[in-house]
Amino acid sequence: MSVTKLTKNANGVFLCPKCGQELRTREGGAVEIRNGRVDMSATLPKYICDTCGVYYQELLNSGFYDVLDLPQEWRVAPRPKKHKLLRTGDIEPMELHKDANGQCVCPRCGELMDFVEGQPVRIVDGKPDFENVKDHFRCSYCESVYRRIASTNYFQWSEK
């Protein structure tokens, strides 16, 4: 059992003393029964460092924190890498073709985007909605929309 003092950054978030990363907070839960005894430590907040694989828990409101190994069920999967997005002004009109699944690679971010077929005009909140009237591609990752240019196979990035 090692005890340490945690420091806060300018935003008031605790920092890990080992690696300097911001600590993720896990609020305390209900009282637990372990080995037939009441475990009050489950009610205390925990400050988690996913990088180091440890968490910190305050000892008796002293301002000092006990360092414990992080249980497997509390670990967070690493975030996927963000794709580099092209600026919308750099995207020229281009030919886009859907595959058998109705998808195509997004020129802006590289993820798969879906082909949306034209639909009749819909009434939304008492007003006509013309957004999905023409065929277009929509990327769910970067929220880009590519609309067809005048009955050609060329598509251009478009605002919603």
Image (spheres, rainbow, N blue to C red):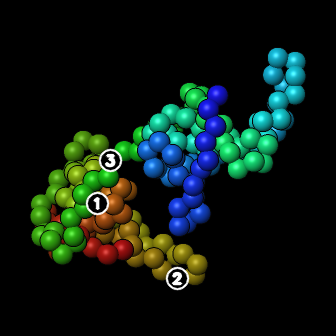
Tell me: 94 left or right of 10. left
Is residue 29 shown above or below 146? above
- The mark closer to the camera, 2 or 3, is 3
The quarter of the image holding the N terminus is top right
N-terminal-most mark, 2 or 1: 2
Q: How far apart are the alpha carbons under marks 2 and 3?
A: 40 Å
Tell me: 144 left or right of 59. left
Image location of residue 21, percent across then percent down = 46, 50
Which is more toward the observer, 72 or 37? 37
Is residue 117 shown above or below 1? below
Image location of residue 13, percent across then percent down = 57, 58
Res. 137 mark: 1
The residue indicated by pointer 2 is: 127
Which is more toward the observer, 135 or 32? 32
Tell me what residue is drawn at x 27 percent, y 53 percent. 83
Tell me: 48 left or right of 88. right
Going by the picture, which residue comes out furthest to the right? 37
- The mark closer to the camera, 2 or 1, is 1
Tell me the kind of residue under disc 1.
Answer: Phe
Is residue 134 shown above or below 56? below
Which is more toward the observer, 69 or 79? 69
Mark 2 vs 1: CB contact within 8 A = no
Tell me the kind of residue under disc 3.
Answer: Lys
The quarter of the image holding the C terminus is bottom left
Tell me the kind of residue under disc 2.
Answer: Lys
Tell me: 29 left or right of 122. right
Res. 81 mark: 3
Q: Secondary structure at mark 3?
A: loop
N-terminal-most mark, 3 or 1: 3
Tell me what residue is drawn at x 17 percent, y 53 percent. 97
N-terminal-most mark, 2 or 3: 3
